[in-house]
């Protein structure tokens, strides 16, 4: 007894696509097998990143990333978004030293008394980072545009009036801070 699957027009197209894909695979051209995709994904590793929530008078410092993806320098596709200072942890680098280095390079501040306030799991189609959020309420200096090819401006924003669009890892750090939780968002 037939179940009627073959008679539905959409199902016929799906069966035809499967047959074409199988033929291409047998001929050694066309698509990768599921196991090949899984093996390729297993070779990828998540990265470690961090964002620093610089807070002064209940305002957070955010920078506007360049709208050109090549200049915005973001594996998580943050072009044209507002972000906090931060970056990637380099192999063998101490986490706190990395945070101090990035904040100095990006905005010219010398940070003190960093506190971990957030851990997020940030995934896009072609990148995966575990992002550690830090709070900095003590610092020396005034924010400056140190990398104009990447960040076009820095501004202070009230926590209840954030600009849009926000870089999603930075937005998660702020949400976790406001919710008084380390992991979530």
Image (cartoon, grey):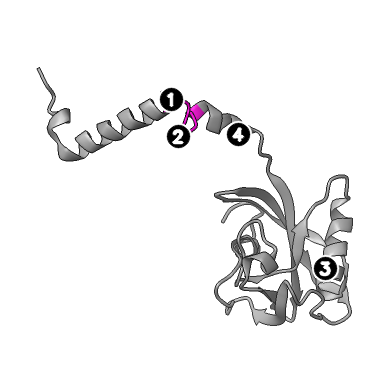
4 and 1 marks in contact (CB < 8 Å)? no
Q: Which residue is mark 3?
A: 103
Q: Secondary structure at mark 2?
A: loop
Q: Which residues are magenta?
A: 25-34
* Callout 1 crowding tier (Cα within 10 Å): few <14, some 14–19, many ≥20: few
Tell me what residue is drawn at x 26 percent, y 33 percent.
16
Label 1 vs label 3: CA separation?
54 Å
Residue 179 in the image: above or below residue 149: above
1 and 2 marks in contact (CB < 8 Å)? yes
Q: Position of residue 99 (x, y in %)?
A: 83, 60
**Label drawn at residue 40:** 4
Tell me what residue is drawn at x 48 percent, y 28 percent.
33
Which sits earlier in the primary sequence, circle 2 or circle 3? 2
Q: Position of residue 111 (x, y in %)?
A: 87, 69
Q: Which residue is mark 2?
A: 30
Q: Secondary structure at mark 3?
A: helix
Q: Is residue 20 left or right of residue 151?
A: left
Residue 138 forms part of the magenta stretch: no
């Amino acid at each position: 007894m037939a179940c009627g699957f073959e008679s539905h027009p959409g199902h016929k197209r799906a069966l035809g696509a499967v047959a074409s894909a199988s033929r291409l695979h047998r001929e050694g051209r066309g698509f990768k097998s599921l196991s090949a995709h899984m093996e390729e994904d297993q070779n990828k590793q998540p990265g470690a990143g961090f964002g620093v929530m610089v807070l002064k008078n209940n305002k957070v410092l955010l920078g506007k990333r360049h709208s050109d993806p090549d200049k915005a320098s973001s594996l998580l596709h943050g072009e044209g978004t507002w972000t906090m200072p931060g970056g990637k942890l380099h192999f063998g680098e101490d986490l706190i030293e990395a945070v101090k280095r990035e904040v100095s390079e990006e905005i010219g501040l010398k940070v003190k008394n960093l506190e971990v306030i957030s851990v997020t799991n940030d995934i896009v189609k072609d990148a995966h980072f575990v992002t550690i959020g830090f709070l900095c309420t003590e610092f020396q200096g005034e924010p400056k545009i140190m990398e104009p090819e990447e960040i076009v401006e820095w501004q202070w924003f009230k926590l209840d009036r954030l600009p849009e669009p926000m870089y999603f890892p930075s937005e998660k750090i702020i949400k976790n801070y406001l919710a008084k939780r380390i992991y979530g968002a």
